[in-house]
Amino acid sequence: MLTTTYIRDNKERVLQGLRIRNWTEDRLHIVDDIIAADDARKKEKTELDDMLAERNRMSKEIGGLFKQGKKDEANALREQVNALKDRAEKVENELNESRDRLEEMLLQLPNVPHPSVPAGTTEEDNEVYREWEGDLPELGDDAKPHWELAKDFQIFDMELGVKIAGAGFILYRKNGAKLQRALINFFLDEADRAGYEEVMPPHLVNADSARGTGQLPDKEGQMYHTEKDSLYLIPTAEVPVTNILRGDIVEEADLPIKFTGYTPCFRREAGSYGAHVRGLNRVHQFDKVEIVQAVHPDKSYAHLDEMVEHVAGLLNKLELPYRILRLCGGDIGFTSALTYDFESYSAAQKRWLEVSSVSNFETFQANRLKLRYRDAETKKVHLAHTLNGSALALARIVATIIENNQTPEGIKVPKVLQSYMGGLEILK
């Protein structure tokens, strides 16, 4: 959530950012509405503070009058205090309404895109930030997509997933389950070597946590909600892991704070149909290892570059061809200032599949979370910057691994995973 101070001081940049996000001109009035609502809030707050100060002064004066035996004057002043109390309550109610109205509008306002974010309306307008420099794998005419290989090699079972839960849920079995576990352990070990603290968070979160990272109200329809307990199944580990720091004031010397965690992720993915979402391309539940950082604002883009290289290193070690996209204004997430998407090439489908997003949220999440750091010199408190990235999302990684590594003898296991699978070199 943007701060009102930022909106006031950077009004033109906020408006330009909304235009980059393809907001139409008739919607931009919300910026002026926010400033007006903040003016009203400040006026009512000043009025209330003045009333409370006057009431306190008069209350002390009443005590003095009683001590002096001036009972009639004291009672007359008490009536004024009671009247002032009634007016103060009315102003306080107006102030609370102004605060709620202001927060409601602020929650509708997305983050301001970084100046490098390209204009565009759809994913077709995303900018290729880094191309794959090698040759893309080419398979023979008898090559199979991963959903057919899954049956031949008993890697996962879509029919059993439907039987147990419904469409979009997958049951991994035998070598498929081992491959999932191998990938999770590999990703976690690599994050550990990169200095991330491993955590195992809850898989459900309350509304405060979902609001803190920006899933509410923006993505409410995409999350599974348990109405009886008012809890949400997490769409990504970003939500519980980032909320570890909600409400905290950390010391500058403790930055950056780096967490990693493995969780299943749950997403409704409403309206996703067609051949492009077959098999593991689009599912309601998938496994993912997430990396999260809270950093000093002056260093957040250096940390973003570091996270991008970390994800690139994972794909290189898996020997998977990939490219990196810088998302355009129409495709970037509500909370993000800058996002890089990683896509891995699916040789059997002959298409690129998204396997990771790495984002810098600047102060947007931190303002909602009230995540701050204390400056080492001035001792003043400031909002931190938060970042997160998929390192990596498993469903499509599994798809590209088994498609790209299919041979007449079986599916080759990437060398980096063989030790995690008991030395297994090929799935037969």
Image (cartoon, rainbow, N blue to C red):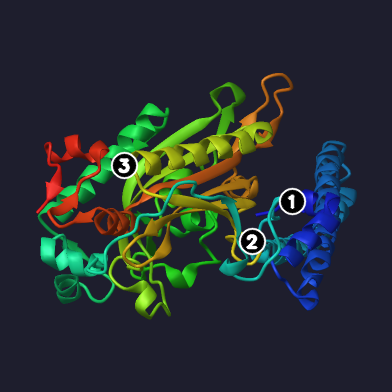
Residue 70, horizontal then vertical, whole percent? 89, 44
Q: Locate the C terminus by quadrant.
A: bottom left
Left or right: where 82 falls relative to 359: right
- Who is closer to the viewer here, 116 or 389? 116
Q: Are marks 2 and 3 in contact (CB under 8 Å)?
A: no
CA distance for labels 3 and 1? 35 Å
Mark 2–mark 3 Cα distance, whole angstroms, equals 33 Å
Q: Residue at label 3?
A: 200
Q: Amino acid at mark 1?
A: Pro
Image quadrant where one finds the N terminus: bottom right
Q: Which mark is residue 328?
A: 2
Where in the figure is residue 418, as x and y percent of width and height?
Answer: 19, 38
- Residue at x 78%, y 58% (from the top left corner): 14
Q: Secondary structure at mark 2?
A: loop
Expressed as whole percent of the image width and height from the top left, the position of residue 301 reads 63, 38
Q: Which residue is mark 1?
A: 115
Q: Amino acid at mark 3?
A: Met
Q: Quadrant of residue 303?
A: top right
Residue 400 vs residue 192, the one in the foreground: 400
